[in-house]
Image (cartoon, coloured by chain):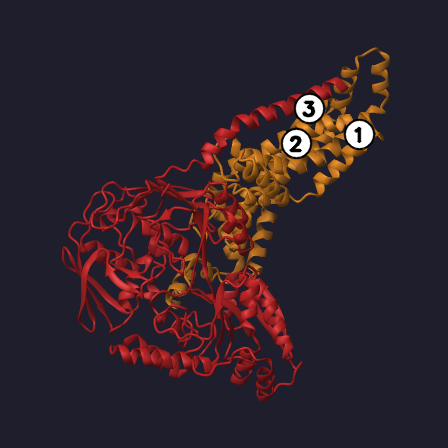
Chain colours: A orange, B red
Amino acid sequence: MIPTLLVTSLLIFWAMDLAGGDPVNQILPENATYEQREILREQMGFNDPFMVRYFRYIGGILSGDMGKSYISGLDVFGTFMGRLHMTLLLGGSALIFACLISVPLGIYTALHQNTWKDTLATVLALFGVSMPNFWLGLMLILLFSLKLGWLPSGGTGGIQYLVLPAVTVGLSLAALLTRTTRSAMLDVIRQDYMTTAKAKGASYRRVIYNHGLRNAMIPIVTAVGMQFSYVMTGSALAETVFGWPGIGRLVVDSINKRDTPMVTGSIILCCVLMAIINLAVDIVYAFCDPRIKAQYSGRS
Amino acid sequence: MRKAMTLLIVIILACTTVWAGATKEEGVAATTGTPKDTLVIGVAQEINEQNPMMQNDQINNNCFVLTHERLIFVDSNNGYLLSPELAESWEWKDDTHLVFHLFKTIKFNNGTPLTAADVAFTLNRARSNDPTKSKISGTLKLITDVSALDDYTVQITTSAFSNELIYNLGAYPLVIQSKAAYEDPANKAPWLVGTGPYRFKEWKEGQYVTYEKRDDYWNAAKEPSIASSITFRFLLEASQRVIALQNGEIDVCIDPPTTDLKFLKEDANITVHTQAGTRLFYLSFNVEKAPFDNQKLRQAVSCAIDKQTIVDIVLDGRGKWQTSVLNRGAWSFLDNDQVEGGYAYDVARAKALLAEAGYQPGQLTVELFSATDDPYKTIAPIVQANLKEIGINVVIKSMDQATLKTECANGHQQLFLWRWNIGARVDETYRELFYTNFPTNYAQLKDAYVDQMADKVLTEKDPEKRLQYSHELQNYFVELVPQVPLYVPDLVIAYKKGLKGAYLTGGGAHDWSRAYIEQ
C-alpha cells in the first residue's frame, strides 16, 4: 500500500504541476499587487523546484498536514473527512438497495435461464447499466419531488433526503450485480456437488442457498467490492444533481477550481480508501469460502 | 423459490408504498413549509472565505453584508449615491486627509462598542502587504496612514487626492472589524465579529451557511430585519435550484438557467425578476504581440463580431451588447449611440480593414484563449465563425481560469475571452485593465495617453472636466480597440411571490438583510 500511495502521490502532484497556471492567481484577487504575489510565492514555496515541493508535501503528510485549500483555506484532511461519512452513507445505502434487488433477481434469472423472464431481466439490466446517473436522478426528482411532492429534491437531513440519491446510484449498481450474480449462479448450478445435494434429498431452498449461493459468493463479493469502490469515489454526478456533499463532488469541484492541495490530498485519500475496501473484500472472502480461511489459518 | 420471490417483491413494494405515504406529509412539511420569518436563498456557488479582507468574491460579500457594515453605503441602484452606514458624516480636510465621524451608538455582535480604533485597525490591516492578513491591499495603495483622532473620529491620510477613494471604502471587503476580537487570543475567528443585523450561525460545507438575526442590532433608525434567519443553500446544479424553488424548498433562486425561465414565468407562485446587469464580457487582444499589435487588424476583428447574435445565443436575448469598455451603468458610461465612430458589426467593412491591415483572407491563423466554463465555451465558437467569415482562422485553446490568467499575465495570448465587473469606480477599468504594467492589464497595453487620462479621471476635482476626460478616454478606446466589448447580461433572479425588502444590484452585490417573504 505504501509504494502505491507514494507513486500515486507523485503522479498526482506531477499532473497538477504540468497543468500550468500560477497558483497565486487562485489564492489572491485579480488586482493583487506584484509585491503581494511575490511575498505569497515565497511564503508558499512556489518558487522552489518540483522535487523540493513534492518532498515538502510528503513530509507534511507524514506529520499529519495535508495542506490547506487554495480556495477556502480549509484543512484538506478535515474537509475530506467531513464529507466522507456522507459518501459512506450514500454508497452504503445504494449498495444495500442494489444487493436487495440484484441478488434475488440474479438467482431467479439463473434458475430461469433462457426463458422470457431471463430475457426481460437482461434487458432491464442493460437499461440500468446504460442509463446515465444524472438523467435518472433528474427524472426521479421530477417525478417524486416536483410532481408527487413525496421527497425533497436535494440536500441533506432526514432519511427522506437519502432515498432519491441512493436509488439513483443503486439502480445502476443493481444492473451490474444482477448480471454478475446470474453468471456466478449459472456456473455453480452445473457443478457435481449441486447434483449430489439434490440426490441426497436436500430441499430446493437448501440446495440453492446453502450449496449454490454460498459457492457463488466469491465473484459476487468481488463485484460488490469493486462497485463500492466506484461509488465511493465516482458518484460525483449523482452528488451534484442531488446537492449531496460527498467526496466525489468535492474532488470534481476542486478540479474545476484548480484547487491543487485539495485535489492532490483527496485523490491520495481516495486511494487509501480503495485499498481499505479491497482489504475488506479479501477478509470477506474468508467468511464466504472456508478454504481461504483454512489457507490463512494454516500459515499461522 | 417462486413463492419466496413473490413474497419478497410484495414485501418490498408494500414497504415502499407505506413508507412513501408516511413520508409524504413529513417531506412536504420539512421542505415546503417555509416559515414566514426565515429566508432560504439557492445560490450557484459556495462561500469560500469568512474573513472579509481575505477575498473579493460576490458570494462571500453577499454574506458579509448581513453580519458587518461599511463606513458608508454606496447605492449602485441610485447613481452611486453615498449615504451613512457606520459613519454619520465625512469630509475632505484637504487634498490628502479624509475624515470620518462615526455614530456613537454602534455595537458589535459581541456587545462591545465600535470606536475609531476599530476602523483604524481594520483599514491598516487591510493595507498590509502580507497575504496572510489581507488580500486586498492592491486597492488601497493610495492610503499612507489611518489613525483615530478620538473615539469617534477617524482620519485617512493619502499620498494624493482621489475621486474614488470614498467609493473604495464602501467596498464589502472593507467592512469594519473588531480590534479587540483580533487581540483576544481565545478568539479563533475574530473576523466573525461585526456590527451588522445578523450574526453567523453555521456553515455546513457543501450544503449551506446560515445567519441568525440579532436582537441587539444598534441601528433602530434603519428599516428592521424581519427574517429570523437567512440561509444560503449551495445548489451548484442550475436545474436543481429551479426545482427546489418550484418545490418550495428555497425562496430565491439566483441565476436560473435561461432555458427554464419560460416554465418559471408560467408558475403562479414565482416571480422572475430581471434588471440591467453590469458585468461586461469581452474579447481582448494582446496589443504588444503580432499580429494584434496592428490597430487596423483589431478594428477589422471588431467589425467582424456579431454581438447581437452572441447575446441571442448565449443569453437568449437577455442582455445588451455594447461598444464602450466601461461597464454598463458605471459613472460616465457611454451607450452605443453615444460613442463617437466605432467598429460595429459590418462584414464588408471588416474585410476592407483586414486588407488595410495588410492581410489577405485565409492568410492569418490565430489562437483564441478561452476558459472551459460557461459562457466562454459558447462564445468562443461564435467568435471563431465570425472571424472565419472575413478570412481569419481561429484555433480555440480551452483552459481553466487560473491557467488563462497566468497565460494572459505572461503575455502568451493573441486573443482571449474574459469578463470584468466594477462598481462605482471607473478606475477599476481604466487602471486595472489598461494602465501600463498593472498586473491585470492582460491586453499588455502601454499607452502614455491612456495612463495620463486614467490619472486625470482619478484626480480631477472639477466634475465637468472629469466627465469630459472619461468620455474622451472611452472614445479613444473605441478607436484604439484594445478589446472588443461584447455584452452585459441582465441580472435574472427567480423568487417566491411576496418577496419584499431585497436590495438587488445588477452587479450581483445583493443585500438580503431586510428581505422576507410576505405570506
Task: Let me know if marks 3 and 2 both belong to one chain.
Answer: no
The amino acid marked with disc number 3 is: Ile
Q: Which residue is mark 1?
A: A117
Residue sitting nearer the eye, B422 or B463: B463
The amino acid marked with disc number 2 is: Ala
SS type, badge 1: helix
- Rounded to the nearest angstrom, the CA distance separating label 2 from label 1 is 19 Å
The amino acid marked with disc number 1 is: Lys
Chain letter, disc 2 residue: A
- Which quarter of the figure has residue B157? bottom left
Q: Residues within 10 Å of mark 1 (few under 14, many from 20)?
A: some
Q: Of the residues tagged 3 and 2, which is closer to the observer?
A: 3
Q: Identify the residue at the far left of this view.
A: B150
Q: Which mark is residue B240?
A: none
Q: Residues within 10 Å of mark 2 (few under 14, many from 20)?
A: many
Q: Residue at x 60, y 48 (%)?
A: A8
User: Looking at the image, is B166 positioned above or below residue B4?
Assistant: below
Marks 3 & 2, CB-CB < 8 Å contact: no
Q: Identify the residue at the far top of this view.
A: A201
Give x and y (percent) for residue A246. 53, 41
Give x and y (percent) for residue B161. 24, 73
Give x and y (percent) for residue A144. 57, 36
> As drawn, is B391 to the left or to the right of B270?
right
Q: Quadrant of the N terminus of chain B?
A: top right
- Rounded to the nearest angstrom, the CA distance separating label 3 from label 2 is 14 Å
Chain letter, disc 1 residue: A
- Rounded to the nearest angstrom, the CA distance separating label 3 from label 1 is 15 Å
> As drawn, is A1 to the left or to the right of B85?
right
Q: Which residue is mark 2?
A: A98
Residue B122 visible somewhere in the drawing: yes
Q: Which residue is mark 3?
A: B9
